[in-house]
Image (tube, rainbow, N blue to C red):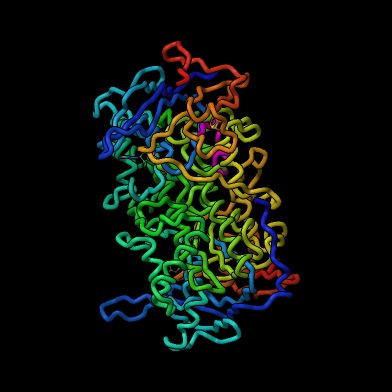
């Protein structure tokens, strides 16, 4: 498989999804009266665009808010603040009924497909259910659609009558993908979709996702803690730290010319599978702060190797330093 | 030549299961020298953990060493009693696991858990143990060690807990440290800290390290020598430079080609077709042949022996038939080619 071709520059494609100051806080309740005592600031005012047919990677360390961002876009978490615009329509305040047509357009693939499959349901039936709930197809046509779907993701027709435990991890992830693409969505959120797979199988699944993207002009929000996979798979990347967007740009800009010291440290911390790569790292000391009690000023200042006084007091703005290359750092 | 600290010879470990007795480790031999890190690498289920658990006598209930030898500084340890083995662990051999939460006791303070091995294995007073515990926490880079002694595991972050585990593992200056995926559950910036720490301590204390990982990046970072396992067998072994610079076995090549290369976006990623066989799947010939793009007729029927080249780099693959068959040291015969 050749290094994956990058989509046309974002400006030429149509915007599919736009986030405008999206915020998600989880209230912390405590005390005898269960009063709200504070908030876990899981996602802090994020604005971005996802274009048709592109993959936007979301990277950052555990707990930085990647999954919460994805779940909030899908409406699985209630939005605290901001706007979500999908296909030119604001969807954050839609009622359940109006929302239904967007449900078809937006799907999610999870890390552990096993957890989202019913162990006692045959795989064919699980997929059939999707068509039964969302289409008016008669039973025989549904069966055909399911078989087509299985083939599309590289599974044999016999899989129809099998149970989830009879599949390997990679095959189960194919079932998860089949379910996500069943209704021809425009947008799929992949939340650590290949993280649990062995590397040899991971490459198979990435290839499948890319083939489907080309065929159906799909857009992916590709959440992963694995920067290697993101660089390989995505067109653009958003780097998050403690709920905040700290940098966003094309894969090339982020990996070759990272502007934010956190991105730089993250890239330098990745163990390279090559013996010539044993080089000096930028070492970050300490752990990620508590998102319920984030630091003042720049969220990264407690671990930042170049922090100055201004970083402790002022929050850096989200600035477009070069075309399509954003960063939030006083010294970017 | 440095002397061997740990020698494992022709280890076969099997499990009693509903499908009968199944071998998880099939005739694996290797050694770890003082001051060296050997990495065992391979994908999920290939037998890495079971190999290391066999070494320290912590196999699950239904598992046992069927044959083979485990020697620590030349003395066989595979038949030691539970009590003797327990004394060895935490004293001369220490182990750290992927999830420190499962290895740390949630209801005991960090201080208690650090002092315990010292009181057990070293003849020290409680006061001396406390002083030593603080020193150990400092050594693994934990800030405010005096305060940490009174804390419980859940009060620490994941990276901090792993450091505590390492501190406990180092308490009695073990000659051999076995680390099973010690950083897999951690973020990359924390992983980098822990790998540096293990490397530094190895140098300072002259420990032998047996490190288990599925991450080729981690291997390149810490290993002196590498052993690649596939479906219960060792398929390749060599120095880290040899294995990365000149991988011999098609599985090792496949592993290296499946990992995206951060420094080279043009890198061609290739998937290995299929997936690792289960323990109960019988495969004739080379266990890798159904997934191997180089498989020849011979591979389907004959299990290749280990071939070894001038650099001591081995591969269990017929493509290297022109090299010498590795002599089996334990019994002086040549590995059978059936
Ligand atoms: N339902 C919830 N209630 C309270 N806090 C939550 C909830 N869900 C997530 N959080 C908190 O929000 C923050 C962001 O979590 P999130 O799961 O989005 O992180 P992530 O980037 O996906 O991490 P990971 O890489 O570990 O999956 C964390 O501090 C988490 O503890
Ligand atoms: N108690 C057990 N009973 C039966 N089979 C077992 C038992 N424990 C492990 N196995 C099997 O032994 C094989 C080797 O397991 P092992 O834990 O050594 O794999 P591993 O290489 O460490 O994988 P991972 O990277 O997932 O940790 C696997 O096929 C596993 O399913
Ligand atoms: S022995 Fe044959 S099947 Fe096995 S790895 Fe070598 S070439 Fe492939
Ligand atoms: Mg997540
Ligand atoms: Mg294991």
Residue A98: horizontal and vertical position, in percent?
46, 88
Quadrant assignment for the N terminus of chain B? top right
The quarter of the picture where residue A239 lies is: bottom right
Question: In this orientation, which residue lies closer to the viewer: B10 or B33?
Answer: B10
Residue lying at 45% horizontally and 12% vertically, measured from the top left: B333
Question: In this orientation, which residue lies closer to the viewer: B222 or A205?
Answer: A205
Q: Is residue B195 left or right of residue B279?
A: right
The quarter of the picture where residue B121 lies is: top left
Residue B108: horizontal and vertical position, in percent?
28, 50
Residue ranking furthest to the top = B332
Visible in this render: residue A211? yes
Question: In this orientation, which residue lies closer to the viewer: B197 or B31?
Answer: B31
Ligand 3: quadrant of the figure: top right
- Give the vertical position of A277 relative to B318 (above or below): below
- Which range is magenta? B217-228
Residue B306: horizontal and vertical position, in percent?
52, 23
- Give the vertical position of B207 relative to A217 (above or below): above
Q: Is residue B318 left or right of residue B268?
A: left
The quarter of the picture where residue A301 lies is: bottom right
Visible in this render: residue B37? no
Query: Does A262 appear in magenta?
Result: no
């Amino acid at each position: 498989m050749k290094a994956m071709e990058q989509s046309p520059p974002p400006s030429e494609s149509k915007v599919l999804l736009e986030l405008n100051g999206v915020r998600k806080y989880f209230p912390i309740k405590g005390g005898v009266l269960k009063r709200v005592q504070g908030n876990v600031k899981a996602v802090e005012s994020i604005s971005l665009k996802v274009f048709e047919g592109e993959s936007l990677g979301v990277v950052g360390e555990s707990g930085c808010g990647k999954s919460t961002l994805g779940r909030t876009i899908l409406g699985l978490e209630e939005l605290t603040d901001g706007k979500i615009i999908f296909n030119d329509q604001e969807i954050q305040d839609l009622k359940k009924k109006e929302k239904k047509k967007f449900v078809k357009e937006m799907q999610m693939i999870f890390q552990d497909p096993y957890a989202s499959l019913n162990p006692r349901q045959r795989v064919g039936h699980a997929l059939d259910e999707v068509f039964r709930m969302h289409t008016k197809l008669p039973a025989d046509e549904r069966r055909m659609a399911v078989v087509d779907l299985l083939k599309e993701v590289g599974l044999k027709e016999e899989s129809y009558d099998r149970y989830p435990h009879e599949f390997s991890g990679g095959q189960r992830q194919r079932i998860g993908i089949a379910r996500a693409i069943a209704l021809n969505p425009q947008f799929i959120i992949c939340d650590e979709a290949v993280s649990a797979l062995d590397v040899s199988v991971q490459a198979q699944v990435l290839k499948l996702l890319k083939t489907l993207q080309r065929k159906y002009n799909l857009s992916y929000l590709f959440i992963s803690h694995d920067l290697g996979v993101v660089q390989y798979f995505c067109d653009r990347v958003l780097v998050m730290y403690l709920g905040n967007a700290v940098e966003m740009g094309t894969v090339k800009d982020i990996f070759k010319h990272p502007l934010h010291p956190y991105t730089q440290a993250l890239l330098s911390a990745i163990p390279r599978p090559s013996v010539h790569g044993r080089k000096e790292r930028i070492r970050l000391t300490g752990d990620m702060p508590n998102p319920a009690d984030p630091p003042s000023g720049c969220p990264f200042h407690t671990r930042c190797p170049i922090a100055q006084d201004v970083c402790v007091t002022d929050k850096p703005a989200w600035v477009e330093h070069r075309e399509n290359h954003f960063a939030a750092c006083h010294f970017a | 030549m440095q002397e061997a600290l740990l020698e494992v010879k022709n280890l076969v470990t099997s499990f009693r299961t509903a499908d009968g007795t199944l071998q998880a480790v099939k005739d694996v031999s290797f050694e770890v020298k003082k001051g060296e890190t050997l990495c065992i690498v391979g994908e999920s289920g290939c037998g890495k953990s079971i190999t290391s658990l066999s070494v320290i006598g912590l196999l699950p209930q239904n598992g046992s060493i069927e044959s083979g030898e485990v020697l620590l500084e030349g003395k066989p340890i595979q038949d030691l009693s539970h009590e003797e083995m327990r004394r060895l662990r935490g004293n001369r051999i220490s182990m750290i696991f992927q999830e420190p939460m499962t290895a740390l006791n949630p209801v005991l303070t960090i201080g208690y858990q650090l002092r315990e091995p010292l009181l057990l294995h070293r003849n020290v007073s409680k006061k001396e143990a406390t002083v030593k515990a603080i020193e150990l926490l400092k050594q693994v880079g934990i800030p405010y060690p005096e305060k940490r002694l009174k804390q419980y595991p859940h009060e620490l972050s994941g990276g901090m807990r792993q450091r505590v585990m390492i501190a406990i593992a180092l308490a009695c200056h073990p000659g051999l440290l076995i680390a099973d995926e010690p950083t897999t559950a951690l973020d990359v910036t924390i992983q980098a800290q822990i790998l540096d720490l293990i490397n530094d301590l190895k140098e300072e204390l002259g420990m032998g390290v047996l490190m288990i990982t599925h991450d080729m990046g981690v291997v390149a970072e810490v290993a002196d020598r590498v052993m690649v396992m596939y479906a219960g067998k060792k398929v390749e072994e060599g120095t880290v430079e040899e294995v990365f610079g000149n991988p011999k076995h098609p599985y090792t090549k496949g592993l290296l080609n499946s990992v995206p290369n951060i420094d080279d976006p043009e890198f061609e990623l290739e998937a290995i077709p299929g997936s690792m066989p289960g323990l109960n799947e019988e495969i004739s010939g080379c266990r890798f042949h159904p997934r191997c793009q180089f498989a020849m007729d011979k591979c389907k029927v004959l299990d290749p022996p280990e071939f070894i080249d001038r650099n001591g780099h081995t591969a269990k693959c017929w493509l290297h038939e022109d090299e010498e068959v590795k002599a089996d040291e334990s019994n002086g015969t040549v590995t059978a080619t059936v």
